């Protein structure tokens, strides 16, 4: 591969098998191995990851996005997609589309005895607010061009008055 091709590949190509993975474990319900594919690429508006959820576990808390749209492609295994209070079976080859908004809170559950592997693709809207209906939390996320990311998680009951501590 010539120098130009190497530069393009480093900005545009990721191989799931070759990049670092993060193990997220929070007993007794959550365990997933995740590879964030878009990190360090030229992608500006798309995020992508591959997650492998352990048998009987969940990938993340039940939530919905106010701005971000998501798509999930089941690569291997089967499980359950908790969407809008319903439990939908999913299996290898299924593609699930989740628009933003409170109509579609969602969560992936591996309800099988085998690992569940899926690809998630999302828009990277900025800023973003994520709500967690089960716990009553909100997460605010803002990323600047300067590389700094701000994430704040709290409950509405912890909200401050607009004028709090102002002179």
Image: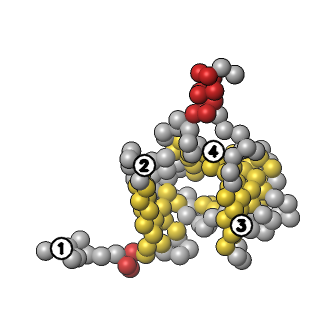
* Spatial separation of the CA atoms under disc 2 and disc 1: 29 Å
Q: Nearer the viewer, residue 43 or 134?
A: 43
Position of 81 compared to 105: left or right?
right
- For the residues carrying marks 2 and 3, which lies nearer the camera in this image? 2
Residue 105 falls in which quadrant of the image?
Answer: bottom right
Name the element at disc 4. Answer: loop
Q: Seen from this angle, which residue lies furthest front?
A: 3
3 or 4: tag closer to the N-terminus: 3
Q: Are marks 2 and 3 in contact (CB under 8 Å)?
A: no
- Provide the secondary structure element on which disc 2 rests: loop
Q: CA distance from mark 3 to mark 1?
A: 43 Å
Q: Return the residue at label 2.
A: 147
Of the numbered discs in the image, which one, if any, rests on residue 31? 3
Disc 3 and disc 1 in contact, CB within 8 angstroms: no
First in sequence, mark 3 or 1: give its number.
3
Which residue does the numbered mark 4 point to in the structure image?
Answer: 37
The residue labelled by disc 1 is 166
For mark 2, does the 10 Å Cα neighbourhood hold few (<14), some (14 to 19), or many (20 or more) residues? few
Q: Provide residue 24's location: percent of width, then percent of height.
A: 67, 65
């Amino acid at each position: 591969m010539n120098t130009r091709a190497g530069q393009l590949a480093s900005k545009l190509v990721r191989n799931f098998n070759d990049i670092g993975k993060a193990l997220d474990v929070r007993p007794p319900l959550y365990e997933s191995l995740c590879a964030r594919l878009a990190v360090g690429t030229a992608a500006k508006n798309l995020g992508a990851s591959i997650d492998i959820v352990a048998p009987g576990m969940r990938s993340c808390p039940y939530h919905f996005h106010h701005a971000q749209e998501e798509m999930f492609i089941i690569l291997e295994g089967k499980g359950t997609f908790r969407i809008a209070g319903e439990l939908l079976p999913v299996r290898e080859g299924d593609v699930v589309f989740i628009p933003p908004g409170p109509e579609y809170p969602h969560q992936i559950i591996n309800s099988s005895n085998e690992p569940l592997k899926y690809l998630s693709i999302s828009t990277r809207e900025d800023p973003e607010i994520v709500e967690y209906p089960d716990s009553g939390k909100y997460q605010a996320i803002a990323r600047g061009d300067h590389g700094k990311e701000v994430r704040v998680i709290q409950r509405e009951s912890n909200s401050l008055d607009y004028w709090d501590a102002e002179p």
